[in-house]
Image (spheres, coloured by chain):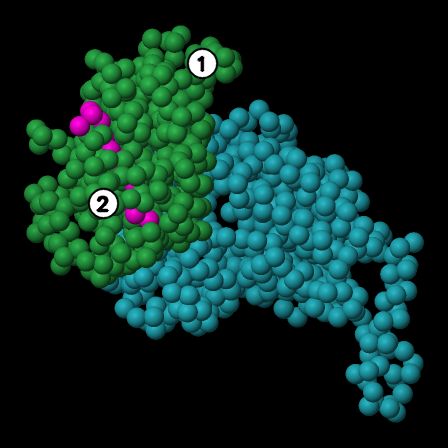
Amino acid sequence: MTSSQLATRLAPRDRTLALLGGEATDANLRRYLHGIPGIDAVGLEQRAADLGSRSIKTTSKKWALDTIIRLIDLTTLEGADTRGKVRSLVGKALTPDAGDPDCPRVAAVCVYGDMVPHAVEALGSAHAAGTGDGIAVAAVATAFPSGRASLAVKLADTADAVAAGADEIDMVIDRGAFLSGHYGLVFDEIVAVKEACRRPDGSHAHLKVILETGELNTYDNVRRASWLAILAGGDFIKTSTGKVAPAATLPVTLSMLEVVRDWHRLTGEKIGVKPAGGIRTSKDAIKYLVTVAETVGEEWLQPHLFRFGASSLLNDVLLQRQKMTTGHYSGPDYVTID
Amino acid sequence: MNFLDYAPAPESQAILNLRSDYGLFIDGEFVAGRGTPFQTIDPATEKRIAMIANANTADVDAAVAAARRAYTGAWSRLSGSDRGKYLFRIARLVQERARELAVAESLDNGKPIKESRDVDVPLVAAWFFYYAGWADKLDHAGLGPNPASLGVAAQVIPWNFPLLMLAWKIAPALAAGNTVVLKPAETTSLTALLFAEILQQADLPPGVVNIITGAGDTGQALVNHPDVNKVAFTGSTAVGRAIARSVAGTDKKLTLELGGKAANIVFDDAPIDQAIEGIVNGIFFNQGHVCCAGSRLLVQESIHDEVIDRLKDRISTLRLGDPLDKNTDIGAINSADQLRRITELTAMGEQEGAERWSADCAIPENGFWFAPTIFTNVSTSHRIARDEIFGPVLSVLTFRTPAEAIAKANNTPYGLSAGIWTDKGSRILAVADKLRAGVIWANTFNRFDPASPFGGYKESGYGREGGRPGLAAYLKPAPSLKPAASLKPAPRRPRAVRAPDATAAPAVSARKKAAK
């Protein structure tokens, strides 16, 4: 079996079978995932801190700020979300900076499943995934954020959002099953959700797998969960729901990027990464860009391979962006709220 | 655009206020040297930074005499807490002028500003803070109550960490109550002279620290000076040997911190990504101009190919160039001489049959540069596996079992440091126990802390710097008191009981005197 066959010719189940040398049982997955080299937490955090100390200035900074905007999944995930709130969010996504028509648009809006029709409606002709100016609709599913529901409910949740027009599904893994060693269960669930992402025409919504790294607690767990999610067919691995602290951190994201790099080495396939929650400033976001570029390569700095799950980040980037053009800082009233 | 071609982010030199000529710092003043002045250059551009005075033997005499006067005058009688106050003051001034010192260090030495800013200068301050705290606690230095200082310390330091080595030498010497004549390396005198300005700012009594600049003959005159009580040297093994020879037979105390050829041992269960970082940091930190650099990579044969692949990928992301750019990872080689030595040794590596790989990075036109390089297929008999290269050059050897790793790691005339990479705690302890090296890092490399002693086995020198042992190197036990009673041959039995009594009483009076 060549590595390219692993990536392209085989469905996740067969591919996993080839890698594990057996079915995706708890025992086989355990043997595989626990055979992956461990992570030294001190060293990982040191490396992340080093990457965070890069100095991104002038033209590089300008490019970085625009790129951050293009990579944002502008998000509202509140119990109080309404049609009006979602329309407002979409308005912001379409016109991030009212004073600058050249300002790029965000990659997607991210909402709860029942808000998908409102998002699709509000986007209108601008709703298009994977094209230049188009904005995708991402929906969280599978009993987000806890994931505590039966598989049937999770699949219905997913299929519902896809049917309503979601281009991307952000699912949560069953952390309980993962932490109790039931890797097979986590695997099967991801495979099933991926299947539920399939549309009648055979295409499928992109699947982002949320690991909820704040609950996994150790970097070794994060690494194993990342491998598991990729083996099971996830298109993206995502750090957090944003509902659990800590959410995205630079070391956690670095460790996930290293898995993506290793998977690419092994199979030639490119998996996306989405840190979500807790990234609020341009300065922090630029550290992520540096980390991506120096770990997997700057090819990953595109919406189909890297996203920020964020809401307040956008306005900070816009303020920084205005500052670069005008030479002075304005203030929160010079950017619009959604 | 290519994001990874980060736009230039140079640290401004505007903060520097350099003179065009620097004199010798003797007795609290800058004075002209009597030798022929020499220039110090920026190794990244080969442009002159300033002219530096050259101390001849008469200057050395003057410096040692000033140190002696300061010692017998005020300093040796000052209370520990008062000496501590000066050291605390110096530490704070170093912090206040940290950016300036970092810029000057990178300019004169060629090391990346991120290293001088984040490693060298913060450690300098930490060293002074640490030994400032010791100054009034010498009773706990391990030499019994009321230990005595040695007198005048002659200190000669290298060019790889100019200001940090100065701190390693001066801080413990002053805390213990000695006075100092220090000679920085010929190519890197600048920050020592800025430090002299800090000493003036701190109002340190004249002569307590004297800084004389010059080449090898100045250093030789200093360590051979008859009125010196202590010699501390950091540098090459060849010079260290010469110093040991010249000091032999005198009553000068000597510490030597010399070369190294450290083994960085990577076991097959190592946390691989962090091990790669550790290997890179071990040998490419400070362009490999580190005596404790992990210059021999011992990697378990079963993961050799994977480690080398990953290592090459990682090294390819290192950014070589302007030391003052905040994104530079690899700066300039410190001098044309050093570059020549690195070039010669690597050429020999190729001749002896090792396989060379160098990162594909653009080398600036002027200045002294060497692309990060690794050699595979190296055997223990190759010169690149035995000689200290002191540059960004890694020799990779393999091993099959822990026993073989230990044997190969120890198979060197040096013994300064070593690294162990494994996820298995018990293996770290078992292997560390058998390595003959002064410092052993586990799952990290090149970490320094003032509380941790540093020093070598075998040809890496003797004596320890840092921590309590580093303090003891500048002290001797309280002078044995020979009161009339003890001259009587009679009752020797209660000696163990009596000895503390005999020393305790004068200790109190000595302290009272110091307090006046």
Kindly identify which chain the residue marked by label 1 belongs to: A
Along the horizontal axis of the image, is B284 left or right of B453?
left
Residue matched to label 1: A335
Q: Amino acid at mark 1?
A: Val
Kindly identify which chain the residue marked by label 2 belongs to: A
Q: Quadrant of residue B27?
A: top right
Q: Amino acid at mark 2?
A: Leu
Instruction: Identify the colour of chain A in the image.
Output: green
Determine the residue positioned at 67% across, 60% down. Answer: B471
Total labels drawn? 2
Determine the residue positioned at 45% across, 41% down. Answer: A245
Residue B460, given in percent of the width and then of the height, sits at: 50, 63
Q: Is residue A327 above or below residue A246?
A: above
Find the magenta span and give its range: A163-175
Q: Is residue A157 above or below residue A282?
A: below
Q: Is residue A170 above or below residue B144?
A: above
Q: Secondary structure at mark 1?
A: loop
Does residue A301 appear in this view?
A: no
Residue B43, given in percent of the width and then of the height, sits at: 47, 36
Q: Is residue A277 above or below residue B78?
A: above
Instruction: Identify the colour of chain B in the image.
Output: cyan
